[in-house]
Amino acid sequence: MEIENVFRNANDRIAGKAAELAWHDPIPFLCECSDSRCFGRLELTLDEYGSVRAHSEQYLMKPGHQLSGGFVLEQDERLAVAEKLYAEHES
């Protein structure tokens, strides 16, 4: 499994727990870039997180970080949203 998918799965669990607890403050999510040494944190609401997750090929990252096999769709001083150019299939 690619590292960005490991972080993405962790973020899905964070979002699930935040929803379960009805947490309304910005929630700390992990950067989903391709750097296995990155422990960047992004602060998002559940609505912001959900809008990115509505597109299965999109990943959340710290601004300036890279996604292997992807390109940045949008970026501001707080976060970047990237999209995979290809999807690797695991067997």
Image (tube, rainbow, N blue to C red):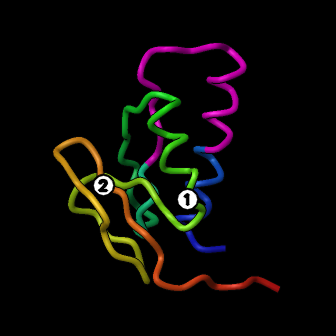
**For this rendering, which residue is in front, 33 or 22?**
22
Q: Which percent across, then down, holds residue 13?
A: 68, 39
**For this rendering, which residue is in front, 67 or 39?**
67
Q: Is mark 2 on a helix, strand or loop?
A: strand
Q: Circle 2 is placed at which residue position?
A: 80
Q: Residue 55 carries which label?
A: 1
Q: Which percent across, then down, holds residue 8?
A: 58, 54
Q: In this view, does 34 lie above or below 77?
A: below
Q: Is 7 placed left or right of 60 in the picture?
A: right
Question: Which badge, 1 or 2, comes first in the chain's sequence?
Answer: 1
Is residue 27 part of the magenta span, yes or no? yes
Q: Which percent across, then down, holds residue 79?
A: 29, 47
Q: What's drawn in magenta, residue-wise?
A: 12-30
Q: What element carries label 1?
A: loop
Tell me the residue at 27%/59% (across/down). 74
Q: How crowded is mark 1: few (under 14 residues within 10 Å), some or many (20 or more)?
A: few
- What number of labels is visible? 2
Q: Looking at the figure, which quarter contains the C terminus?
A: bottom right
Q: Is residue 25 above or below residue 54?
A: above
Q: Which amino acid does label 2 sit on?
A: Ala
Tell me the residue at 69%/32% (across/down). 16
Q: Which amino acid does label 1 sit on?
A: His
Residues at circles 1 and 2 in contact by the CB criterion of under 8 Å: no
Q: Is 74 placed left or right of 24 in the picture?
A: left
Image-quadrant location for residue 50:
top right
